Image: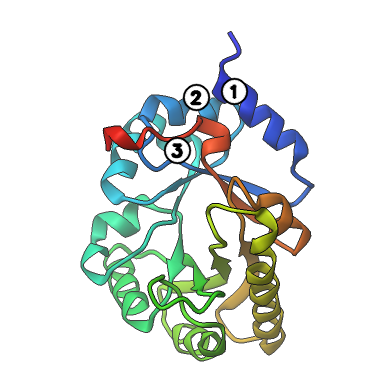
């Protein structure tokens, strides 16, 4: 039986250009829904919360890779966090990076990370402002248990998808500038931009990772949260 999730995954994967990776944003989704998406071809699961990831991992296991895509605070960076994830996409301060580095050192692991760029320079949102990003990447590049693999940004979640374009253009500009620096321990391979409403524009502006949730799983039932 082809379910809605399976059909949605198949449709999205058929539309993505070669070289663009799909992260299934699985916030609030059940382990069974996530497993269904993986069995349909999803290779990367994005989770906002460590505990949700741990529950889903018990069902899905290593059939997929696990990316942390939520807001990360220092007290949330524990040994379980760095053990659970294959990449952390939301590093936006040296404080967070130092804590990840310490925890990874305890388990003998090098964590691939993306630097989150606050491309809209919105004080209420997480992410480093574009003009401060190079300094942060230089600082993190000295750590032994972290490897910077690129950048991530969030465009507007709602509204006209075209409104996201300036966010993506700005982040791609930062990405290319940092890439040209050829810093040690910095690969600048991934540019994670775009969600369900904006991923097509993000791809046009250079994204090679897109985070899609509701277009895979359907809209969330916020009343049950």
Residue 219 image offset from top left, x and y in percent: 47, 34
Circle 3/circle 1 CB separation < 8 Å = no
Q: Which residue is at the front of the view, 13 or 154? A: 154
Dot label at residue 62: 3
Residue 26 visible to the viewer: yes
> Which residue was labeled with disc 2?
36
Circle 3/circle 2 CB separation < 8 Å = no
Residue 130 image offset from top left, x and y in percent: 56, 83
Mark 3 or mark 2, earlier in chain: 2
Circle 2/circle 1 CB separation < 8 Å = yes
Q: Is residue 129 above or below residue 156?
A: below
Which of the image's four quarters has the C terminus? top left
> Which residue was labeled with disc 1?
6
Q: Rounded to the nearest whole Å, what is the CA distance between mark 3 and mark 2?
A: 14 Å
Q: Which residue is at the front of the view, 76 or 102? A: 76
Q: What SS does tag 3 mark?
A: helix
Residue 111 visible to the viewer: no
Residue 116 image offset from top left, x and y in percent: 49, 71
Q: Rounded to the nearest whole Å, what is the CA distance between mark 2 and mark 1?
A: 7 Å
Q: Residue at x 60, y 13 (%)?
A: 2
Specify the quadrant of the image occupied by residue 166. bottom right
Furthest residue toward front? 159
Mark 3 or mark 1, earlier in chain: 1
Q: Rounded to the nearest whole Å, what is the CA distance between mark 3 and mark 1?
A: 19 Å
Q: Residue at x 47, y 86 (%)?
A: 136
Mark 2 or mark 1, earlier in chain: 1
């Amino acid at each position: 039986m082809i379910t809605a999730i399976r059909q949605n995954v198949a449709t999205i994967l058929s539309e993505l250009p070669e070289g663009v990776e799909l992260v299934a944003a699985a916030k609030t989704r059940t382990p069974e829904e996530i497993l269904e998406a993986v069995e349909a071809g999803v290779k990367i699961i994005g989770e906002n919360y460590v505990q949700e990831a741990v529950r889903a991992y018990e069902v899905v296991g290593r059939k997929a890779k696990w990316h942390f895509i939520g807001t990360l605070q220092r007290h949330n960076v524990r040994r379980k966090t760095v053990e659970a994830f294959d990449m952390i996409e939301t590093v936006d301060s040296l404080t967070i990076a130092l804590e990840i580095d310490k925890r990874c050192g305890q388990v003998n692991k090098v964590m691939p990370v993306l630097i989150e760029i606050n491309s809209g320079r919105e004080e209420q949102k997480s992410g480093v402002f574009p003009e401060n990003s190079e300094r942060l990447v230089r600082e993190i590049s000295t750590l032994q248990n972290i490897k910077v693999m690129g950048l991530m940004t969030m465009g507007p979640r709602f509204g006209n998808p075209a409104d996201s374009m300036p966010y993506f253009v700005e982040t791609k500009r930062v990405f290319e500038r940092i890439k040209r620096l050829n810093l040690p321990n910095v690969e600048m391979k991934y540019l994670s931009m775009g969600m369900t409403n904006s991923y097509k524009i993000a791809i046009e502006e250079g994204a090679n990772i897109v985070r899609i949730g509701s277009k895979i799983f359907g809209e969330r039932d916020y009343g049950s949260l």
